[in-house]
Amino acid sequence: MSRFVEFMKQCKPFIKEGFSQSALVAKFLCLLHLTNNYLCSPVLVYGPSMLPTLNLTGDVLLVEHLSTKMGKVGPGDVVVVRSPENPRKSVTKRIVAMEGETVTFLVEPGLSDRSHTVLVPKGHVWIQGDNIHSSRDSRQFGPIPYGLIVGKAFCRVWPPDGFGRLAQE
């Protein structure tokens, strides 16, 4: 029994240090979780729908989440939205109109000049990709609920030659 007690006395500083380091890691992970979910997070965006604003092969954007919670997004802002067609996916589009505004859009761009006008209902926004010839957006699935907006993209961090604030249209 005395060997065990002696062993525990020798291990006590290591155990204490282990708990201290574990608490530090836990605090860091909590801070990371809060930052990523409620303040700002990186998002990988790729595809043709936002050409020429974003690259076809992929950009990493910083997306802040406070503006959407405070109702501070509007026409011209690039937003990340939970897809209304597949909630497991996110899409990146530009807000074109807010609730109460009317939108006139080409039904089949490049194929006909036929247009359609829609009034955006309360609690919804109208989103479109910058590349109207290759984008699934509100023209196909209609206005989206404001609650589907994940965040507002404000900065491109990758690729390095495109680093900087995103332009608002």
Image (spheres, grey):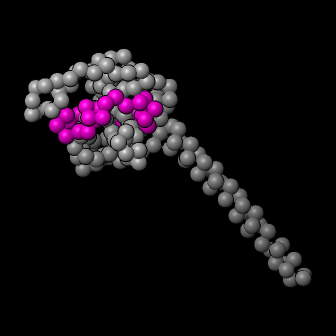
Residue in view at x 10 percent, y 33 percent: 110
Which x, y percent locates residue 21?
Answer: 67, 59
Above or below, comparing residue 15 to residue 108 in the picture: below
Q: Is residue 12 visible?
A: yes
**Image point (41%, 44%), residue name:** 87
Q: Is residue 33 left or right of residue 123?
A: right
Along the line of sight, which residue is nearer the eye, 55 or 21? Answer: 55
Residue 38 appears left or right of 90: right
Q: How many marks?
A: 0
Q: For the N terminus, give its image quadrant.
A: bottom right
Q: What residue is shown at x 83% (from left), y 72% (from top)?
A: 9
Front residue of 75 and 124: 124
Image position, residue 139 (x, y; %): 25, 31
Asked if the magenta segment contains residue 152, the reply would be yes
Residue 127, image quadrant: top left
Coordinates of residue 80 in the picture (x, y in percent)? 38, 38
Q: Residue at 50% of width from left, 29% of height from top?
A: 69
Give yes or no for residue 125 being in the magenta stretch: no
- Residue closer to the observer: 50 or 116: 116
Q: Is residue 82 left or right of residue 160?
A: right
Q: Which image quadrant: the C terminus?
A: top left
Q: Which residues are magenta?
A: 130-157
Q: Quadrant of residue 122?
A: top left
Residue 157 seen in the current view: no
Q: Nearer the viewer, residue 108 or 162?
A: 108
Dividing the picture into quarters, in which one does residue 106 lie? Answer: top left
